[in-house]
Amino acid sequence: MIKQELRDPANYNSVIAAVAQDHSRLNEIATATKIKATSLRSFLNNLIELEIVERVVPITEDPNKSKKSVYKIKDGMYRFWYRFIPMRLTLIERGLSAVNKINTKK
């Protein structure tokens, strides 16, 4: 979906990955992705529009002015994929999943 909807899938993937790895504040995401915070806002806004990411603002803050907002992965499938799959991708591609190991021991 990212490749179809957005122009720069590599940057969007890195933004989603950073948020999935608990980099939730704008400056943390910018540091993790090496994207300037000014450019990062448009990436995040597009991901919010696609309902992949959500911006959470404390209830005591004005949503239009708050600098205390955090970003979270809204879509459960994306949250799972970007949190667990990348670090295990090589094992999965080789067929070395935990389920496969259990089945071969029987």
Image (spheres, grey):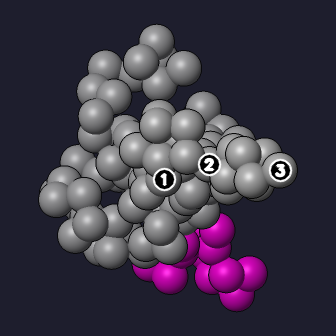
Callout 2 amino acid: Ser
Q: Which mark is residue 88?
A: 1
Percent x, y of residue 93: 47, 34
Decide which of tag 1 and tag 3 comes sooner along the chain.
1
* Dominant secondary-structure state across the stretch colored magenta: loop
Frontmost of labels 2 and 1 is 2
Where disc 1 sits, the SS reads helix
Residue at (31%, 20%) from the top-left corner? 7
For the point 26% across and 66% down, the residue is 32
Residue, disc 2 = 97
Mark 3: amino acid: Lys
Q: Earlier in the sequence, mark 2 or mark 1?
A: 1
* In front of the other: 11 or 81: 81
Residue 62, image x, y percentages: 61, 75
Expressed as whole percent of the image width and height from the top left, the position of residue 22 reads 50, 73
The residue stretch that appears in magenta: 55-70
In the image shown, does 89 or 104 lie closer to the viewer? 104
Q: Residues within 10 Å of mark 3 (few under 14, many from 20)?
A: few
Q: In the image, 60: left or right of 37?
A: right
- In the image, what residue occupies the spot 60% across and 62% down? 72
Q: Residue furthest top?
A: 4
Q: Which residue is mark 3?
A: 106
Dots 2 and 1: beta carbons under 8 Å?
A: yes
Residue 64 on the magenta segment: yes
Q: Compared to 59, does 39 lie above or below?
A: above
Residue 25's image quarter?
bottom left
Q: Are marks 3 and 2 in contact (CB under 8 Å)?
A: no
From the top left corner, tell me how far across and down residue 63 is, in percent.
60, 68
